[in-house]
Amino acid sequence: MNATTKIRLALVDDEQLITTLLEQFFEQQSDVEVVLTAHSGASLQEQLAQMADLPHVLLLDLRLPQMDGVAIALWLQKNYPDIQIVVVSSHYQKTFMGYLLKAGVSGFVPKGVLPQQLLEVVRTVHDQGYYFLPEQVDIMRRQITSKAPKPKLDLPIAITAREKEILELLCQQKTAQEIADTLYITRRTVEGHKINLLSKTGMKNTAGLIVYAIKEGIIDLQGLHLE
């Protein structure tokens, strides 16, 4: 954020006293500008529709009349996905966090946090796109299913189109000379491709190449024509 750009902030809470106090606090900050305050979902929707420059960050209470904070978050995710949402609510429960993250929320803090901490949350979400308390990170770790797959760190082996043709013909039990005749290349060229494939895959022989091709899904067995 350059020196002339301020964080455009929106405040959405059904208690006018809270929005007034927060607005007064944030307006004292050199890098924040409160551009919208709303006390209901309908008011928020109406004001956003009339704005040329949208808020960067929106502080959102969950308990609101007619349209609650969760519904607003889902609506914002669909219609204004670039607005970063931070839920600030007295209905702070750790079990809500996963659902709110899926609803597009970038941060979730309990009401009652110090204004200076809330300012840090706003700045962090604006700069990094999210803000998590240490206890929330621990919750997410515990919520990850044990069935989650282990990352596969091996980089995919680059097989050229010609090498794939060679593999397909090897799987059809073609000899090097038969492959050469089929592809209109020399037997020496075929052997060169085989050597490259053995080097890339780490296999020791033609049988190993066939097993590798089938295992990695390079060869479609259903479309394979065996003589």
Image: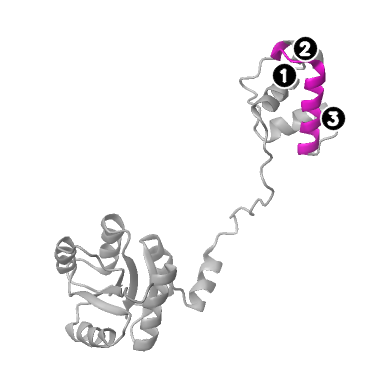
Pointer 1 residue: 169
170 relative to 39, above or below: above
Q: Residue 33 magenta-drawn?
A: no
Q: Which residue is drawn at 16% across and 60% down?
A: 49
Q: Farthest right residue?
A: 204
Which part of the image, by quadrant, shows the C terminus?
top right
Label 2 or label 1, whichever comes before in sequence order: 1
Drawn side of residue 191 relative to residue 183, left or right? right
Q: At x 71% / y 12%, what residue is drawn?
A: 184
Q: Residue 71 carries which label?
A: none
Magenta span: chief secondary structure: helix
User: Measured from the top left, where is residue 207 in percent x and y?
Assistant: 81, 27
Label of residue 205 in the image: 3
Q: Which amino acid does label 2 sit on?
A: Glu
Residue 178's disc is: 2
Query: In the rendered view of the protein, which quadrant contains the N terminus?
Result: bottom left
Q: How far is the residue under mark 2 from the one under mark 1?
A: 9 Å
Magenta part of the protein: which range? 182-201
Q: Distance between the residues labelled 2 and 3?
A: 18 Å
**Residue 81 sits in which quadrant?**
bottom left
Please report the residue visible at 70 percent of the width from the left and 14 percent of the height from the top: 183
Name the amino acid type tagged 1. Answer: Leu
- Residue 227: in sight, yes or no? no
Q: Quadrant of residue 25?
A: bottom left
- The image shows residue 204, relative to residue 58, as above or below, that is above
Residue at disc 3, secondary structure: loop
